[in-house]
Amino acid sequence: MVEWWWSVLGAAVPAVMAGQAFRTKKRRDEEERSNRARGREKNSDDIFVCERVCTSNRMLKKVGAFSKDPTPDTCVTVCGVSELDACADACARTVCVNQHQVPNWNDICLKRCQSECLRLSQSSVVSS
C-alpha cells in the first residue's frame, strides 16, 4: 500500500522547483538591468550623466509606502559617472530622504526609485 505522504511529496517537489526557477529568473533579470545601467558609464565625450528626480505623485505611487514623509513636488538634478549613480543619489536626496525605522524599507525605497528613474531616462533617450 502506498503511503499518503508520497503523494504530498510528489506535489511539493514540482512546486518548490518552480519557485526556485522563478526566483533565479527574477535575480538574473535584476542583475542584467543593473549591468546595463552600469554599462552606460561616461564616454570620452561625456564627463557626467545627469538625472532629475522629482517627488511627483507618479514617483510616489511607484515607490509606495516605502518613502517616509516625502516633501511633495520637490525636484533635484544630480550628476554622476553613470545613470545608475545619478539616479541613486537623486533618489536619496528627494524621495527616500527620511529614514525608516524598519531597516529594509530604505533599501526598497531606493531600489524602486532607481528603477523608475532609469526607466524614465531610457524612455526619454528612446523618444529623443
Image (cartoon, rainbow, N blue to C red):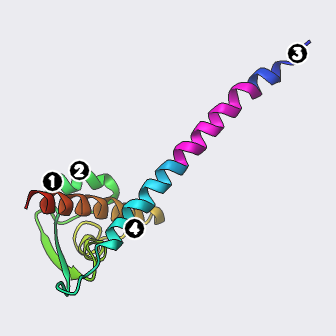
- The kind of secondary structure element at disc 3 is loop
Q: Reading the chain from its start, which is encountered first: label 2 or label 3?
A: 3
Residue 70 placement, left or right of 84: left
- The kind of secondary structure element at disc 2 is helix
- The kind of secondary structure element at disc 1 is helix
Binning the other alpha carbons within 10 Å of mark 1 as few (below 14), some (14 to 19) or many (20 upward) gives few
Binning the other alpha carbons within 10 Å of mark 4 as few (below 14), some (14 to 19) or many (20 upward) gives few
Q: Which residue is mark 2?
A: 61
CA gap between label 1 and label 4 equals: 29 Å
CA gap between label 2 and label 3 equals: 53 Å
The reply to whether discs 1 and 2 touch (Cβ–Cβ < 8 Å) is yes
Q: Which mark is residue 35?
A: 4
Q: Which residue is mark 1?
A: 57
Q: Which residue is mark 3?
A: 2
Which marked residue is nearer to the observer: mark 4 or mark 3? 4
Q: Reading the chain from its start, which is encountered first: label 1 or label 4?
A: 4
| Magenta stretch holds residue 39 | no
